[in-house]
Amino acid sequence: MKKEKQSRKKPAKGVTRRGFLTGMGTAVVSSAVLGPVLTSTQAETLPPTRPKGLEDISLTVNGITYSLAVEPRWTLAEVLRDHLGLTGTKIGCNAGECGACTVILEGKAVYSCSQLAVWLDGKKITTVEGLASSGDLDPLQRAFIEHDAAQCGYCTSGQLMSAKALLSRNLHPSREDVQRALTGNLCRCSNYNGIVEAVLAASK
């Protein structure tokens, strides 16, 4: 028997319901992804957009005043390192425990990883970069070198800033005073004796 040829129906002309819905969905997705199309002239005249959620603050760091727009979640350590390029301030634990990020805030040694930048509008800050003057090392820095107080060096900037804050309020501290002032600064190389000797030498 000859197989009967199956009759193929030609698709009906016009737009089917499925085709209409598919086309509409594609158009919606395309417009959502691409957005409005701007001419080159329109694009050039658009004003720069400011990211939402930024707060304006002013910080005086090492004698220089900076006007900054910061996110409320940024710590002082992040602003110093990532936005002002002052990488002498180290981030160790990032939890306010090791002291590697210590800076001097209004004369007091503080952990910069535990201070939000938005809290410090109008404040004066000194980092390790601010110790040297006109290319000359601070006597405290020279004492650290002479007494081998720096080992791996990662904690050194924090140790220096805590010691500087101490010497700023007490020119002739006792050994116990130095040990107490450096309690919050960990040295993973355990060079505490060398650090204390350096601070005592600088005080003389």
Image (cartoon, rainbow, N blue to C red):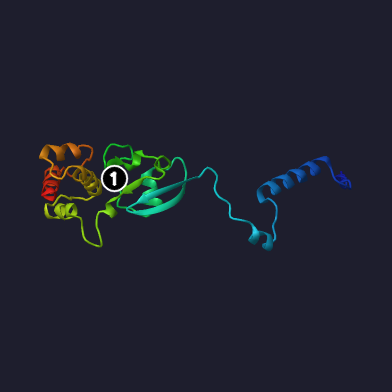
Residue 187 in view of the camera: no
Q: Residue at x 17, y 36 (%)?
A: 180
- In the drawing, does residue 100 fall left or right of residue 144? right
Give how far across and how far down residue 36 sits, in percent. 70, 52
- How many marks the image carries: the answer is 1
Q: Which residue is drawn at 70% across and 48% down?
A: 31
Give how far across and how far down residue 5 sits, in percent. 87, 46
Instruction: Inspect the image, locate mark 1, and give the three-letter code of the amino acid beneath it.
Output: Ile
Give how far across and how far down residue 145 sits, in percent. 15, 55
Residue 158 in view of the camera: yes
Give how far across and how far down residue 39 sits, in percent. 70, 61
Q: Residue at x 78, y 41 (%)?
A: 21
- In the drawing, does residue 102 fall left or right of residue 118? left
- In the drawing, does residue 132 fall left or right of residue 172? right
Quadrant into which the N terminus falls: top right
Residue 165: which quarter of the image? top left
Q: Is residue 68 above or below residue 41?
A: above
Q: In this view, does 47 lie above or below 74?
A: below
Residue 146: which quarter of the image? bottom left
Question: Toward the viewer: 56 or 78?
Answer: 56
Question: Toward the viewer: 193 or 126?
Answer: 126
Q: Residue at x 12, y 37 (%)?
A: 176
Residue annotated with mark 1 = 104
Secondary element type, mark 1? strand
